[in-house]
Image: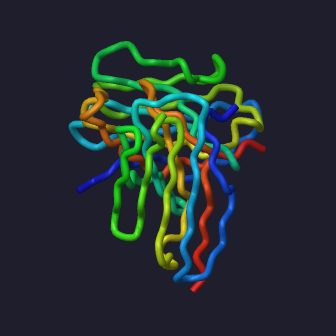
Amino acid sequence: TQLLEQSPQFLSIQEGENLTVYCNSSSVFSSLQWYRQEPGEGPVLLVTVVTGGEVKKLKRLTFQFGDARKDSSLHITAAQPGDTGLYLCAGEDYKLSFGAGTTVTVRA
Amino acid sequence: GAGVSQSPSNKVTEKGKDVELRCDPISGHTALYWYRQSLGQGLEFLIYFQGNSAPDKSGLPSDRFSAERTGGSVSTLTIQRTQQEDSAVYLCASSSTGRQGISTRETQYFGPGTRLLVL
């Protein structure tokens, strides 16, 4: 049973379009992390959000932590082929609990 | 600088055989984690080592799984009597201290993983 549910499972868009990935849970986490994983590699940390309602921006990526610290979203503006990858969210209690991920494909 | 390395990168074995997977953490990192990533699943926590403390083995799925960390550095994950459902990518990560707090979140650095296929 996944503590964290990610949606959608797959997302394929054209270069230049926007996309949003969601991460939802019934549990409250002390923090939530987003990772991107490319084929044949381990996940790489993108951002950590800690405070309910927090919004963090990383270039074209915007991360939001829900007010109740149970959910989060990742929004990519004007997606590029280099954004292609598996996006994972992970909630932290005393260890990380990962969602199953969203596979994002950005077509040139 | 050198990141987390894992070996072998791929391993194919027959059901019932034992396998050993190796992880070399980033030099100086005292915390080391093992995860399992199955197809369509998120990363599943297996075990956590922090310095000389007793490891947190709460994620190990069965007694066929064990792990050691020698000298506070290299770690070996051993799976005995492998089963087909053990097929997955096994990922190792390390962090500076493993201490976690509200404002000081330790970044875990992941290795590339070992892809295990049990036939």
- Quarter occupied by the N terminus of chain A: top right
**Is residue A103 among the parts visible in the rendering?**
yes
Q: Is residue B77 left or right of residue A31?
A: right
In percent of width and height, residue A46 lies at 39, 55
**Is residue B34 among the parts visible in the rendering?**
no
Front one among B29 and B10: B29
Please name the residue shown 61% across and 56% down the image.
Answer: A102
In percent of width and height, residue B14 lies at 75, 40
In percent of width and height, residue B39 lies at 69, 49
Say how the picture is coloured.
Answer: rainbow
What is the tally of numbered marks visible in this picture? 0
Q: Is residue B87 left or right of residue A49?
A: right
Front one among A57 and A40: A57
Q: Is residue A74 left or right of residue B3?
A: right
Front one among B15 and A61: A61
Q: Quadrant of residue A32?
A: top left
Q: Quadrant of residue B56?
A: top left
Residue B102 higher or lower than B1, as above or below: above
